[in-house]
Image (cartoon, rainbow, N blue to C red):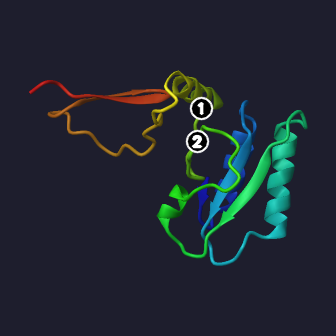
Amino acid sequence: MNTWKRYDLLKQSISHYASCSGLESIHIVWSEPNPPSDSLSTFLNHVIESKTRGLKKVELSFDINKEDSLNNRFKEIPGLKTDAVFSIDDDVIFPCSSVEFAFKVWQSAPNAMVGFVPRAHWVDKTVCIFLNILPLHILFFPSL
Protein backbone atom coordinates (compact mmCIF):
# COMPACT_ATOMS: atom_id res chain seq x y z
CA MET A 1 0.00 0.00 0.00
CA ASN A 2 1.46 3.30 -1.06
CA THR A 3 1.15 6.17 1.41
CA TRP A 4 2.53 9.65 2.04
CA LYS A 5 1.84 11.60 5.23
CA ARG A 6 -1.86 10.68 5.32
CA TYR A 7 -2.01 8.68 8.51
CA ASP A 8 -5.79 8.87 8.89
CA LEU A 9 -6.26 7.47 5.37
CA LEU A 10 -3.65 4.80 6.04
CA LYS A 11 -5.44 3.75 9.23
CA GLN A 12 -8.80 3.59 7.42
CA SER A 13 -7.37 1.55 4.54
CA ILE A 14 -5.56 -0.90 6.80
CA SER A 15 -8.70 -1.29 8.89
CA HIS A 16 -10.76 -2.04 5.80
CA TYR A 17 -8.40 -4.41 3.99
CA ALA A 18 -7.52 -6.30 7.20
CA SER A 19 -11.15 -7.46 7.26
CA CYS A 20 -10.87 -9.04 3.77
CA SER A 21 -10.46 -12.81 3.63
CA GLY A 22 -7.37 -14.28 2.04
CA LEU A 23 -5.07 -11.54 3.28
CA GLU A 24 -1.56 -12.83 3.97
CA SER A 25 0.37 -9.64 4.63
CA ILE A 26 0.31 -5.88 4.26
CA HIS A 27 3.36 -4.08 2.94
CA ILE A 28 3.32 -0.32 3.32
CA VAL A 29 5.48 1.56 0.82
CA TRP A 30 6.96 4.24 3.08
CA SER A 31 8.74 7.10 1.27
CA GLU A 32 8.74 9.75 3.99
CA PRO A 33 12.00 11.18 5.30
CA ASN A 34 11.35 9.83 8.82
CA PRO A 35 10.50 6.20 9.59
CA PRO A 36 7.01 5.36 10.86
CA SER A 37 6.51 6.04 14.54
CA ASP A 38 6.26 3.20 17.02
CA SER A 39 2.78 4.42 17.95
CA LEU A 40 1.60 4.21 14.31
CA SER A 41 3.05 0.73 13.89
CA THR A 42 1.52 -0.44 17.18
CA PHE A 43 -1.87 1.05 16.24
CA LEU A 44 -1.89 -0.62 12.81
CA ASN A 45 -0.89 -3.99 14.25
CA HIS A 46 -3.68 -3.68 16.81
CA VAL A 47 -6.20 -2.85 14.05
CA ILE A 48 -5.09 -5.88 12.03
CA GLU A 49 -5.36 -8.18 15.02
CA SER A 50 -8.81 -6.88 15.94
CA LYS A 51 -10.13 -7.08 12.35
CA THR A 52 -8.86 -10.63 11.86
CA ARG A 53 -10.14 -11.54 15.35
CA GLY A 54 -6.90 -13.37 15.98
CA LEU A 55 -8.04 -16.16 13.62
CA LYS A 56 -5.10 -15.67 11.27
CA LYS A 57 -1.71 -14.01 11.43
CA VAL A 58 -1.42 -11.11 8.99
CA GLU A 59 2.09 -9.72 8.75
CA LEU A 60 2.52 -5.93 8.63
CA SER A 61 5.74 -4.51 7.25
CA PHE A 62 7.00 -1.12 6.18
CA ASP A 63 9.10 -1.01 3.04
CA ILE A 64 11.26 2.00 3.93
CA ASN A 65 12.57 4.05 1.00
CA LYS A 66 15.19 6.77 1.25
CA GLU A 67 13.85 8.77 -1.68
CA ASP A 68 10.33 10.05 -2.27
CA SER A 69 9.14 8.59 -5.55
CA LEU A 70 5.86 7.23 -6.82
CA ASN A 71 7.96 4.53 -8.47
CA ASN A 72 8.81 3.03 -5.07
CA ARG A 73 5.62 0.99 -5.36
CA PHE A 74 7.23 -1.00 -8.18
CA LYS A 75 10.27 -2.13 -6.22
CA GLU A 76 10.70 -5.77 -5.28
CA ILE A 77 8.97 -6.71 -2.03
CA PRO A 78 11.52 -8.50 0.16
CA GLY A 79 10.26 -11.69 1.77
CA LEU A 80 7.11 -11.90 -0.34
CA LYS A 81 5.43 -15.28 0.27
CA THR A 82 2.60 -15.11 -2.28
CA ASP A 83 2.31 -15.02 -6.06
CA ALA A 84 -0.51 -12.46 -6.09
CA VAL A 85 -0.04 -8.82 -5.08
CA PHE A 86 -2.85 -6.29 -4.69
CA SER A 87 -1.26 -2.86 -5.11
CA ILE A 88 -3.32 0.07 -3.88
CA ASP A 89 -2.97 3.63 -2.62
CA ASP A 90 -4.08 4.53 0.88
CA ASP A 91 -6.90 6.74 -0.43
CA VAL A 92 -8.60 4.07 -2.56
CA ILE A 93 -10.89 1.50 -0.99
CA PHE A 94 -12.57 -1.31 -2.89
CA PRO A 95 -15.13 -3.60 -1.30
CA CYS A 96 -13.60 -6.87 -0.09
CA SER A 97 -15.94 -8.74 -2.43
CA SER A 98 -14.41 -6.89 -5.40
CA VAL A 99 -10.87 -7.68 -4.30
CA GLU A 100 -11.80 -11.33 -3.79
CA PHE A 101 -13.43 -11.40 -7.24
CA ALA A 102 -10.30 -9.93 -8.82
CA PHE A 103 -8.22 -12.59 -7.08
CA LYS A 104 -10.45 -15.34 -8.50
CA VAL A 105 -10.11 -13.81 -11.97
CA TRP A 106 -6.33 -13.75 -11.52
CA GLN A 107 -6.35 -17.40 -10.42
CA SER A 108 -7.94 -18.30 -13.76
CA ALA A 109 -4.98 -16.68 -15.59
CA PRO A 110 -2.08 -16.33 -13.13
CA ASN A 111 0.36 -15.06 -15.76
CA ALA A 112 -1.86 -12.03 -16.43
CA MET A 113 -2.32 -8.78 -14.57
CA VAL A 114 -5.77 -8.08 -13.16
CA GLY A 115 -6.76 -4.69 -11.84
CA PHE A 116 -9.13 -1.83 -11.46
CA VAL A 117 -9.33 1.68 -12.89
CA PRO A 118 -9.92 3.72 -9.74
CA ARG A 119 -9.11 7.14 -11.15
CA ALA A 120 -11.00 7.44 -14.43
CA HIS A 121 -11.50 11.17 -14.91
CA TRP A 122 -13.42 11.62 -18.14
CA VAL A 123 -14.43 9.87 -21.32
CA ASP A 124 -14.84 11.31 -24.80
CA LYS A 125 -18.20 9.77 -25.75
CA THR A 126 -17.52 10.32 -29.44
CA VAL A 127 -14.66 7.82 -29.21
CA CYS A 128 -15.87 5.20 -26.74
CA ILE A 129 -18.62 4.16 -24.39
CA PHE A 130 -17.80 4.02 -20.69
CA LEU A 131 -19.71 1.70 -18.39
CA ASN A 132 -19.15 2.14 -14.67
CA ILE A 133 -20.30 -1.23 -13.40
CA LEU A 134 -19.12 -1.78 -9.87
CA PRO A 135 -16.72 -3.28 -9.11
CA LEU A 136 -15.26 -3.07 -12.62
CA HIS A 137 -14.91 -0.22 -15.07
CA ILE A 138 -15.28 -1.38 -18.65
CA LEU A 139 -14.35 0.57 -21.76
CA PHE A 140 -15.86 -0.39 -25.11
CA PHE A 141 -14.31 1.06 -28.25
CA PRO A 142 -16.65 0.96 -31.24
CA SER A 143 -15.07 -0.01 -34.55
CA LEU A 144 -14.23 3.00 -36.67
Residue lying at the far bottom of the rendered structure: 33
Residue 132 as seen in the image, left or right of residue 45? left
Give the spatial CA distance, label 2 vs label 1. Answer: 8 Å
Is 110 located above or below residue 32 in the figure? above
Choose between 131 and 60: the one closer to the eye: 60
Labels 2 and 1 touching (C-beta < 8 A)? yes
Seen at 85% across and 36% down, the residue is 56
Q: Which element carries disc 1, helix, strand or loop?
A: helix
User: Residue 66, position in %: x, y?
Assistant: 60, 76
Is 117 located above or below residue 21 in the figure? below
Please tell me how crowded label 1 is: few (under 14), some (14-19), or many (20+) other residues with Cα within 10 Å: many
Q: Where, quadrant-wise, is the C terminus in this rendering?
A: top left
> What is the total number of numbered labels drawn onto the structure image?
2
Q: Counting residues from the N terminus, which is met first, the one under dot 2 or under dot 1?
A: 2
User: Residue 81, position in %: x, y?
Assistant: 70, 43
Please tell me how crowded label 2 is: few (under 14), some (14-19), or many (20+) other residues with Cα within 10 Å: few
Quarter of the rendering containing residue 67: bottom right
| Three-letter code, disc 1 | Val
Quarter of the rendering containing residue 139: top left
Seen at 46% across and 42% down, the residue is 118
Q: Name the residue tied to disc 1.
A: 99
Q: Name the residue tied to disc 2.
A: 86
| Three-letter code, disc 2 | Phe
Q: Nearer the viewer, mark 2 or mark 1?
A: 2
Quarter of the rendering containing residue 104: top right
Q: Which element carries disc 2, helix, strand or loop?
A: loop
Residue lying at the far left of the rendered structure: 144
Is 128 located above or below residue 24 in the figure? above
